[in-house]
Amino acid sequence: MKGTKSKLILHSSTPLRRRLFNRLFALIYAAAISVLLYHQAGTLIRRGTTFLSFFTSLSFLISDLILAFMWINSQAFRMNPVATKTFPENLLEVLNRPEDFPALDVFICTADPHKEPPVMVAATVLSVMAYDYPAEKLSVYVSDDGWSEVTLFALMEAVEFGKVWLPFCKTNGVMERCPEAYFGSDFATRNCSSETEKIKDMYENMKTRVENAVERGHIADEYKSSMQKAKAFGKWAKDFTIQDHPAVVQVISQNSEDKDDAGCSLPNLIYVSRQKSRTTPHHFKAGALNVLLRVSAVMTNSPIILTLDCDMISNDPSTPHKMLCFFIDNSIKHSLGYVQLPACSSGLNNADIYGSDLKRMSHINPMGLNGLLGPEYFGSGTFFNRRAFYGGPLSMIEPEVPELSPDYAVRKPINDQAILDLAHQVASCDYENQSKWGSKIGLRYGSLVEDYYTSYRLHCEGWRSIFCNPKRPAFMSEAPISLHTVIIQMKRWSVGLLEVALSKYSPLTFGIRFIGPLMTHCYSYYAFGPIWPFPIMIYAFLPQLTMLHNISIFPKVSDSRFFLYTFLFLGAYLQDFFEFILSEGTILRWWNDQRMWLIMGLSSNLFGTLEYISNHLGISSRGFDVTYKTNDNDLRKRYDEGMFEFGVASPMFVPLSTAAIMNLAAFLWGIFQVLMGKYDLFGQVVIAGFGVVNSWPIYEAMVLRNDKGKMPTKITLISGFLAWIMFVLSSFVVQM
């Protein structure tokens, strides 16, 4: 890959050697699956004479068909994995002057000041304002769907602190430019100067002022001394609510006017809270990003856009330079929709018990997509070509006003009254009525997973994307330390994915016409992920219940089909294991990652599917679940010790606990039967034993722990009762 002007290499792509093995293994494994399904169908026909035999045979056939379908989808990621590398050291040979750099708009979204603390939002903003990028080319937009004057106050405080922080970082070559990360737990071990200590005190004082404002719930009069601040905070009238309020677009810093303590320009910082009305749908995060897309078009209209969640801090100030290695390459830039960086988590315990590193979704699979049309949009840590939001590469869709066009040149300063008036207009709740926003322009509406759905539609329109995984993570976010938080987030994803899978834009019917079979399988792997609960529940309960009645349903060890089952199980798991290890994972983290796949299947995927069904039956209305970004000290301690958190009496823990109890009872009974010479139950004993090993944290939380994170007694009793009911009902079925 060559650069645009100097022919210097700016980036490279290297196919991974394991792709040849993957293709050969896929052929062998596919043959084994075909044999299994042939035997399953034959068993259903030959032995389906009783209700029990018919039910078990049909259940396993459907389960194995689903597993086969998902396996076929997963193989698309493995056909041509490609690793990319950038050479930003060559960039300055192409871009010689600051004015040669393309402008960059950064979008940061927050939705609730209590779940997403304003101090955290301010720290994220400071981390990107401190990029090694020309300040006159950098603008940061913060979308506040929580309509919080405290968030605005936090950003004002951040700018004042940034006047000291930004020159300090650039003078001293600081890599961790988020002050919260820099002044973190290991700060005391550094040999710091008096200047550094002074800056730390300034940051702590800023945090105290913001946190006090959060506790009060409003801004004290002493912070409204200037006319500009009084006017800004005066927009929060008592007559308005979070669900019903006017738009607020507030310029906090302007690079043409505001300077830091070193006399250098500060980047633009703009606070945006879009208008909300109870009678108008707001489309959650997708709606917020589309408002930022329009407001930024009016004010700066930078050709490149970075989207970030409010808890995802910059970890490398040179990240924009690395991204430009792709965006200025004439050979790809006209069809390049976005560059995706992985989501890396900080604060993980050694075992990563909740699989929060998302190794497969954010590291392994994206490399497989690099060899196709590119990775899906993760929702954060993504550099977009603004033009990608306005139709395909060869068929641009013109917006309703020329000021919103990606080609429009903004000539007025961002605080010009005409600019601000238009910005407020495009941030109104009814602006999108009878328009193409959300359907053909901007982020796409129709799914709770707006990131996945938008990238899917962009790929269908002809855009490509690139996954870039630099050695130093570009962004870091705080890992969730509560199982319930993880499950809630995954449940929301499950609902949104089903909204795509079962819509007219399903990858199997719509996508196949535009993105080809391999890319269709990749998108189908995620879209149909919520169907995992069916095979997982069948294998978590049916072999165990039949074993408790001394009924063998799997081949004996001496039967050749037993080795077929063994190959299918070990083959899939070992391939997953080696890919995980080759992606710098550990054995313990891989084990917890596969355990979380089982947990999600029995909790978030299951309840997400039920919520999707109930939504479409009109039984309940969907909502946007904002997960807490704050941590409790005791909770953090338990997480660091590798203890699962079950302290919430959530109904989503009931299937997990019921399966754990059932597998333990079946395993103990099966061991007894095998010792008594009933070897034909060995396969079921192995499955139950696998369930028991994976359920150890649940047993521990039920019986051995007394802390606040133990399993609520209510959940344990309900689960035990349900396991007993299932056993009793199965007794009647056996006798039929």
Image (spheres, grey):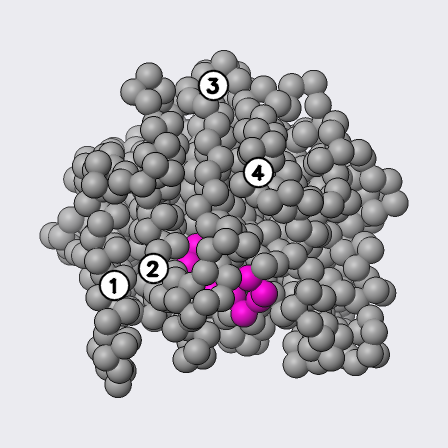
- Amino acid type, residue under disc 3 in the picture: Ser
Residue placed under numbered mark 3 in the picture:
277
Separation of disc 3 and disc 4 at Cα?
Answer: 27 Å
Extreme residue toward the right, this view = 394
What stretch of residues is rendered in magenta?
A: 125-135
- Amino acid type, residue under disc 4 in the picture: Asp
Please tell me which of labels 1 and 3 falls first in the chain: 1
Query: In what quadrant of the picture does the N terminus appear?
Result: bottom right
- Amino acid type, residue under disc 2 in the picture: Phe
Separation of disc 1 and disc 3 at Cα?
Answer: 39 Å
Please tell me which of labels 3 and 4 falls first in the chain: 3
- The residue tagged with tag 1: helix, strand or loop? helix
* Residue 431 lies in quadrant: top right
Please tell me which of labels 2 and 3 falls first in the chain: 2
Residue at image point 54% right, 22% down? 429
Judge whether residue 124 can be spotted in this image: no
Residue at image point 45% right, 23% down? 246
- The residue tagged with tag 2: helix, strand or loop? helix
Camera-near label (2 vs 3) is 2
Residue placed under numbered mark 4 in the picture:
416
Please tell me which of labels 4 and 1 falls first in the chain: 1
Residue placed under numbered mark 2 in the picture:
161
Q: Nearer the viewer, residue 132 or 655?
A: 132
Give coordinates of residue 257: x percent, y percent: 50, 53
Q: Nearer the viewer, residue 503 or 633?
A: 633
Residue placed under numbered mark 1 in the picture:
202
The reply to whether callout 3 and callout 4 are in contact (CB within 8 Å) is no
- The residue tagged with tag 3: helix, strand or loop? loop
